[in-house]
Amino acid sequence: MTTSPTLLVLAAGMGSRYGGLKQIDPVGPCGEIVIDYSIYDALRAGFGRVVFVIRKDIEESFREAIGRRLEARADVDYVYQELSALPPGYSIPPNRTKPWGTGHAILMARQTIREPFASINADDFYGAHSYKLLGQTLSATKTDSDDHCMVGFTLRHTLSDYGSVARGICECDPKGFLQRVEEHTRIEKAPEGARSFDANGRAIELTGQELVSMNMWGFTPALFPQLETEFKAFLDRRSGDPKAELYIPSVVDALVAQKHARVKVLTTPDPWFGVTYKDDKALVIQSIRDLIAAGQYPEKLWE
């Protein structure tokens, strides 16, 4: 029996660079937000349930913006990412206000998800074919498997004109399995392609053709105990740093290196776009209008 995969939407981020709750900012012609298009694409790709990771303090505005209209169309659940959601024996450092990162956000769903699932950022537009690829792959994956997957995008197609971005740069073997993913937290456009800066401010020149993770992952529940172990190790190493985060690409990189998991890289022809900065919004609005004009989406998404 095939189980429909679940879509896990990471929507708890504070949007520090964008300056507001970017997850609920309209971009469609009838007030749609980016998540609307993600859910629409996922449902028609065979996903059966949607789980949102949010913060308690944005719950009311978030449900007003999207939750209620989706609850009539899909099985919707909510889980909460809070600073206090820590393993026994750990406490919040006194100078900590920033969320613990995408790895911690996914961990919040461990009691709710029992089937293969896709994990996405709330504010990223990934394209219909990307969801179809993930849906097909996850539907054929056993629940207890250590085989995961991700959708890869070309770096130059994911950069902003208005500032730096964070991206996980990937290396694959000849069979298309992930060998390594390295999180770069400050990548910007450059005349010759792209440029990354490390923690010491040293520049790393890139071609722009690199394959990157946009946090569109396909996992099984086998990830959760491994993720819990990685989160404890992160807290032991870095909880004293008020800005340190556990990024899911770093977790995947560790699991692959330890041969605890395999990750198949799926490539998509779809464009990626998203709102990292306020000035990115105009491009997102125009891109969605172009897709509507091409017949890929109706003018009014939810009739």
Image (tube, rainbow, N blue to C red):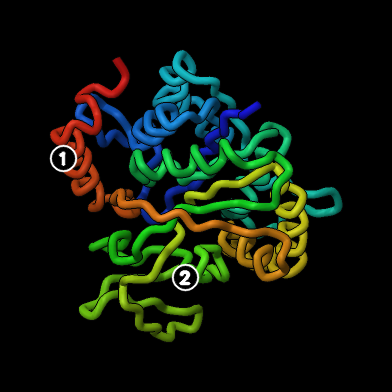
- Residue 262 visible to the viewer: yes
The residue drawn where x is 69% and y is 39% is: 143
Find residue 10 and report its horizontal and vertical position in percent: 52, 42
The residue drawn where x is 32% and y is 19% is: 302
Relative height, residue 230 to residue 275 (above, below): below
Residue 158 left/right relative to 261:
left
Quadrant including the N terminus: top right
Find residue 148 and report its horizontal and vertical position in percent: 60, 51
Residue 208 left/right relative to 224:
left
Which residue type carries mark 1? Asp
SS of the residue at dot 2? strand
Of the image marks 2 and 1, the number of the one nearer the N terminus: 2
Badge number at residue 290 = 1
Relative height, residue 203 to residue 141 (above, below): below
Which residue bears the numbered disc 2? 184
Pick whichever, 192 or 239, lies toward us.
192
Residue 237 left/right relative to 189:
right
Quadrant including the C terminus: top left
Which residue type carries mark 2? His
- Residue 53 visible to the viewer: no
SS of the residue at dot 1? helix
Q: Quadrant of residue 256?
A: bottom right
Find residue 224 and report its horizontal and vertical position in percent: 72, 47
The residue drawn where x is 53% and y is 70% is: 173
